Amino acid sequence: METLKQKIEHLNALILEGKAMEGFELYYDDEVVMQENETAPTVGKDANRTREIEFFGAITEFRGASVRDVAVGDNVTMVTWKYDYTHKDWGVRNYTQVAVQHWQDGKIVREQFFYSPS
């Protein structure tokens, strides 16, 4: 049985390999709730899949991503990411983001992203 630490490390590795959607299909619950900062959450795997595909499709230049820190607790993981890319609508984005995942039965049921919107 995979530990939570192994799961988040595998998910992070998939993201770094350019396989974020593979990780999404593998580790996210059908009823997952995802939220950017304090904006309204997106509910359900189908709606979040669409949102993720639109996001990745809008990246016009990808310069890098790296994991800075990982923390694992009781059914919760937190990852600090550093991203550098250009988005067709938002322009150049170079920022640090903290992603907090809440897990149930081996799947992410809630994820919230915290970052500066500038």
Image: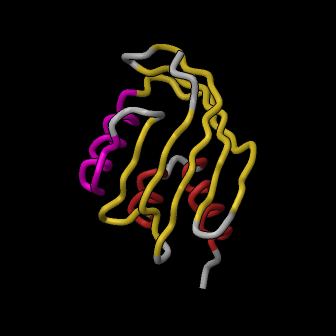
Secondary structure of the magenta portion, mostly? helix
Q: Is residue 43 above or below residue 3?
A: above
Which residue sits furthest right?
69
> Against 27, is 89 above or below?
above
Give the magenta part as a residue range. 41-58
| Residue 108 percent location from the top left of the image | 46, 63
Magenta residue check for 54: yes
Report if residue 12 lies within the magenta region: no
- Write the residue at 43% across / 27% down: 59
| Residue at position x 61%, y 79% in the image | 2
Q: Horizontal placement of 67 versus 44: left or right?
A: right
Residue in the picture at 38% in, 32% down: 39
Q: Residue furthest bottom?
A: 1
- Towards the viewer: 81 or 98: 98
Along the horizontal axis of the image, is 43 left or right of 118? left
Number of numbered labels in the structure image: 0
Q: Quadrant of residue 56?
A: top left
Asked if residue 80 is positioned above or below residue 109 in the image, the reply reads above
Applied colour scheme: secondary structure
Report x, y in % for residue 28: 41, 62
**Image location (x, y in percent) of residue 31:** 30, 62
Residue beneath the point at 61% across and 35% down: 97
Q: Quadrant of the N terminus?
A: bottom right
